[in-house]
Amino acid sequence: MLPLYAVFGHPIAHSRSPDIHALFAAQEGVAVRYERRLVEGSLHDALLPFAAAGGSGANVTVPCKEEAFHLCAERSVRAEQAGAVNTLIRLPENAWRGDNTDGIGLVNDITRLGVSLRGAKVLLLGAGGAVRGVLGPILAENPAAVTVANRTAAKAHTLAALFDVQAALFSELAGTRFDVVINGTSASLAGENLPLPSNIFEQAKLAYDMMYAPQDTPFLRQARGGGAQHCADGLGMLVGQAAASYALWRGFEPELEPVLHTMRERLRHA
């Protein structure tokens, strides 16, 4: 029987994880099964038949990451920091160990792009789960300062206090410059521009959107217009977090560049 893995979420038909993990398995020289599994009730109930079928590990996407966190018998430090789990590793007795590879996927992709977070002034846009999931690994890179900015003050201040970073409203960013600006909001999915002062990008070495698309997202168009030196979407983060999950399951670290190239070509021709 082939090793069985899956990605759980709702919706799930759009997920590119099976394609990515098939490329990782080809690198390793093995055959695995990797499935999309729709969660229509609870994640707990969805995991039962998966475990019974011999499931060894799983990825978890929206809206199930927080439930996954609470289901786990063990959790990594990264998962504890994020308050969410995107990677499940099978333990004995149908128990699960939870990890969160989103932040390491982002940090590794920023490094791949030739930008160092060490000593950098970093701005994170948004104060939801996506931003909380990456703050721990970003802070581990020893940036000079990190600011969490949001449309509403309460969420920004709550998250900033949790990680001992600065908080701001979008409207309070005027006149401030950053080395790295990361969009963790869902605005790009909705095709919306964020209400940002354009001058925040004037000294930016990198503007990074955690979303990805065949063309520039609205945020990346804003960043280019504001003078950001380099702009990137989140496809590298997607591949990177998947690679970290695969390594946790199988002890094999995939080479990212060829997989990223293949997925970029598929995205362009989708």
Image (spheres, helix red, strand yellow):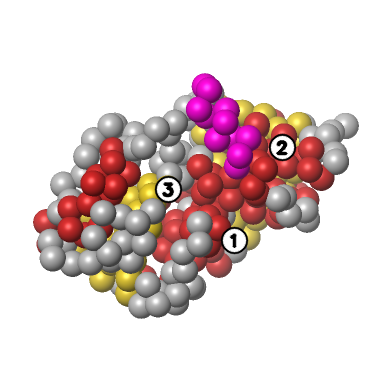
Disc sitting over residue 75 in the figure: 1
For badge 2, the amino acid type reads Leu
Residue furthest right in the image: 1
Query: Residue 97: horizontal and vertical position, in percent?
Result: 65, 55
Looking at the image, residue 81 sits to the left or right of residue 144; the answer is right
Q: 170 left or right of 75?
A: left
Instruction: Please state the extent of the stretch shown in magenta in the rendering.
Output: 260-270
> For the residue carrying disc 3, how many other residues have a C-alpha within 10 Å: few (<14), some (14-19), or many (20+)?
many
Taking depth in this image into account, of 51 and 264 the one nearest to the observer is 264
Residue 162, how many percent across, how many down? 34, 69
Asked if the residues shown at circle 2 and circle 3 are in contact, with their CB atoms under 8 angstroms apart, the answer is no
Q: CA distance from mark 2 to mark 3?
A: 22 Å
Question: Mark 1 vs mark 3: which is more N-terminal?
Answer: 1
Task: Report x, y in % for residue 17.
Answer: 61, 35
Of the numbered discs 2 and 3, the one sitting upstream in the chain is 2
Residue located beneath label 2 in the image: 23
Q: Secondary structure at mark 1?
A: strand
Q: Are marks 1 and 3 in contact (CB under 8 Å)?
A: no
The N terminus - image quarter: top right
Residue linked to disc 3: 232
Tell me: 198 left or right of 255: left
Which amino acid lies under the numbered mark 3 shown in the image of this protein?
Answer: Ala
Residue closer to the observer: 128 or 103: 103
Asked which secondary structure carries label 2, the reply is helix
Q: Which residue is rendered at x = 50% and y = 62% of the image?
A: 114
- Which secondary structure lies at badge 3? strand
Residue type, mark 1 in image: Arg
Identify the residue at horizontal 35%, vertical 56% (top origin): 229
Q: As drawn, is 259 to the left or to the right of 52?
A: left
Between the C-alphas of marks 1 and 3, the distance is 31 Å
Whether residue 48 is in magenta: the answer is no
